[in-house]
Amino acid sequence: MMADTRKLMRALAGEKQAVPPVWMMRQAGRYLPEYKATRARAGDFLSLCYTPDLAAEVTLQPIRRYGFDAAILFADILLVPQALGADLWFVTGEGPRLSTISGPDDLARLKPADAIHDRLSPIYETVRILRRDLPADTPLIGFAGAPWTVATYMIAGQGTPDQAPAHALRIGDPHSFDALIDLITDATIHYLKAQIEAGAEVVKLFDSWAGSLPEQAFARYSTAPIKRIITALKAAHPDVPVIAFPREAAKGYAGFAKATGADCVALDNSVSAAWAADHVQIDGCVQGNLAPGHMVTGGQALIDETRRIVEAFSGGPHIFNLGHGITPDANPDNVHVMLQEIRG
Ligand code: CP3
């Protein structure tokens, strides 16, 4: 097979490049007026996720505006819980709300892992549209939440600052907690396989709350389920690279690629690029890690930080990205400033 010459795929294959590929988490989002217009047409966020033409349209918007080196499917990590039978809605200005899980009775009401596809079939259709409409040189990234992070929302029924309800179930009823993690893990394998079969060329696992797990629990509930998902995906699709994002893992980032089989580890901005180059990039590709706040404040600090990160990771494979999603108050012009600094 001929080697893939696209910048993102080369970085994921372990190649060091003078100019790294670049994309941004939440690149399709509320900082863009065209996103807000399409979201208004859809009516609400979930309708946007489940309307393939419109979800594909917002995925394409940042590609047209900025020419990023990758597109990421427009969807949400909480569609999997919904497909498993949880109630899901979004409260404007506040975030997601779900039915909660407090023990075996709530678990028993969920569907089996392989029953998710009917509900999620519009997402697979979005992937097919994107593979048709994206420029041939722009790879499509599919994604899912990692089991621990998805479990934190399913248990608490909303985002929580410290994930306390999930920690309470993990410690107080480990049997139910393990069953929930296993169910989400199996569903995620089904979901990502289906995204790949529809045309996703890379997949990313978001473990946004990995940082709140103490060491032993991190190994058991972040590393192990992610490893199980990657092992299953690689068995079916050995050539599809996987990016893993155990956000705020701190020293847990070291060794994470080896422990899980991930082709790339995405870094949040709480770790320094210099440290990550020595302790994470030694094992392969890294992605990150500009603080999203620079997209709000801009100026020389944005330029200096962008340069510093590119230089710190210049010795190995690197995908430039933010350390977390771009925020709604970001100035779209600052994205051009960042791109100019990276690409010259
Ligand atoms: O990155 C992308 O452009 C792809 C699409 C994407 C969204 N969510 C769209 C979205 C991706 C990859 C996600 C992942 C996601 N969703 C995560 C993991 C990454 C992270 O941010 O830590 C999490 C925890 C969620 C759950 C979620 N979805 C929350 C907590 C919220 C509310 C907070 C917020 O930003 O409003 C969402 C809503 C959401 N998901 C929006 C978008 C564009 C904003 C919804 C809107 O348009 O009102």
Image: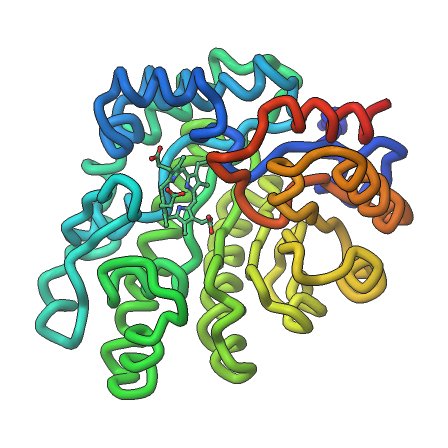
Q: Nearer the viewer, residue 166 or 295?
A: 295
Name the image quarter holding residue 99.
bottom left
Residue 288 in the image: x percent, y percent?
69, 47
Q: Name the residue rendered at 53%, 15% in the picture.
A: 134
Locate residue 232 relative to residue 150 in the image: left or right.
Answer: right
Quadrant location, the N terminus: top right
Q: Is residue 94 above or below residue 327?
A: below
Q: Residue at x 59, y 15 (%)?
A: 65
Which one is in front, 94 or 286? Answer: 94
For the image, the number of numbered tags is 0
State which quarter of the image contains the C terminus: top right
Residue depicted at 50% across the width and 51% down the height: 205
**Residue 115 spot, x, y in % from top left:** 19, 47
Q: Nearer the viewer, residue 338 or 60?
A: 338
Q: In this view of the protein, can residue 288 be seen by the observer? A: no
Q: Is residue 336 above or below residue 111?
A: above
**Identity of the residue furthest to the bottom in this view:** 172
Which quadrant would residue 6 be assigned to in this image? top right
> Which coloring applies here?
rainbow
Q: Quadrant of ligand 1?
A: top left
Give the vertical position of 259 relative to 75 (above or below): below
- Residue 173, compared with residue 52, is above or below; it is below
Whether residue 264 is visible to the viewer of this picture, yes or no, is yes
Q: What residue lies at 53% left-to-right and 31% top-to-bottom?
A: 27
| Residue 14 at x, y percent in the picture | 79, 45
Q: Return the x and y of residue 60 as percentages of the image width and height.
A: 49, 18
